[in-house]
Image: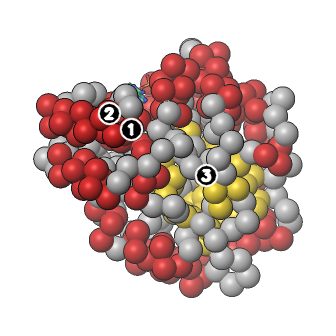
Amino acid sequence: MERVKFGRTESLVSPMGVGTYYDFTWIAPAKILRIKKGAERKVDAIKAALDSGINFIDTAEIYETEPLVARAVKDMEREKLFIATKVWPIHFSYDGVIKSCNRSLKKLNMKYIDLYQLHFGSNPKKIKEALRAMEYLVDQGKIRHIGISNFDINQTKEAVSSLKKHELASTQMNFNVSHRNIEKDIIPYCKENGIAVLAYYPLAHGVLTEELPETKNVLKTIEKNHGKKTAPQIALNWFMSKYDFVFPIPRASNPDHVRENAGSMGWKMSQEEIEMLENSVKTLKGPTWSGDKT
Ligand SMILES: NC(=O)c1ccc[n+]([C@@H]2O[C@H](COP(=O)([O-])OP(=O)(O)OC[C@H]3O[C@@H](n4cnc5c(N)ncnc54)[C@H](OP(=O)(O)O)[C@@H]3O)[C@@H](O)[C@H]2O)c1
């Protein structure tokens, strides 16, 4: 199983992870009515990721999927996993972050979280307080690393300078081959400072899973050079071919898709192929997200 260092930390992760955000059609019934339609299949999809060599799972307190992660990993050796979750901004107070972390640990049925992320930017005072709580949680052994998500470059720099005892391990942003805004500031900053990047919407929420007229020639060239690869495998491989500190986290809800996506690991595109792919998708539009600051 291929493992790489997560940014400048000593933690070892697969070159890609999986996400467990299933939109509000899952979150609302799960939260309000305790209805969890399709939970079994989602657990199977996470298990398919683990069987395919992926040890890196992203969830969040707001997603209502921490218990699904707990079920999927229950027979796994904890030390071999890398579990990331997030705290929602309404809990960004010192006590709020600690309470949220304890709740997440309970739902995950774990003694520690590998990566605890602030889900969104908020006002600077609240972020500082939340980060202070995160440092306390590292000292307590409840979390291993501190991360942020949806922070613009200035908020990212502020987070880095607010941390007094522990370093910022990662950020999580909307990033894919057709939505590369963060390459102008966040990516170079993270590279320089050893900060890992989790790429959400790595398949542009599905847009990049299809064989598009724009990418037809690229797919042919890649097939000639590397053997048959599918559109989602190429879109995910782009991250691994271009960067060693960026981790795509496509969502795991269909076990067949997860197995297919795992085929994006273990090979690399040439610089020429990378550029060909980037040029082919320049005009495509992926989804944006209210937290997308770039
Ligand atoms: N930090 C944040 O604010 C934030 C925001 C959004 C998302 N996220 C994280 O990022 C993860 C990924 O985001 P996302 O799920 O919205 O976008 P995504 O992974 O870019 O795209 C998911 C879509 O692609 C489809 N898909 C995946 N593999 C496929 C394949 N091999 N063939 C055909 N279709 C395929 C999925 O369908 P199926 O479901 O049927 O496989 C789904 O419709 C989330 O799960 C979450 O963990 C974080």
Q: Mark 2: which amino acid? A: Glu
Assign a secondary structure to mark 1.
Answer: helix
> How many other residues sit within 10 Å of disc 3, few (<14), some (14-19) or many (≥20)?
many
Assign a secondary structure to mark 3.
Answer: strand
Give the residue at x 42% y 45%.
237
First in sequence: mark 3 vs mark 2: 3
Q: Are marks 2 and 1 in contact (CB under 8 Å)?
A: yes
Give the residue at mark 1.
226
- Residue 181 disc label: none
Query: In the image, ligand 1 is in what quadrant?
Result: top left
**In the picture, residue 116 is in which quadrant?**
bottom right
Q: Mark 3: which amino acid? A: Lys
> How many other residues sit within 10 Å of disc 2, few (<14), some (14-19) or many (≥20)?
few
Q: Is residue 92 visible?
A: no
Snapshot colouring: secondary structure
Q: Is the distance from the Cβ of mark 3 to the nearest ligand 1 atom less than 8 Å?
A: yes
Q: Closer to the camera, 29 or 170?
A: 170
Give the residue at mark 2.
223
Number of numbered discs visible in the structure rendering: 3
Foreground: disc 3 or disc 2:
2
> How many other residues sit within 10 Å of disc 1, few (<14), some (14-19) or many (≥20)?
few
Q: Does residue 152 sit above or below 179 in this rendering?
A: below
Q: Are marks 3 and 2 in contact (CB under 8 Å)?
A: no
Give the residue at mark 3.
86
Q: Quadrant of the N terminus?
A: top right
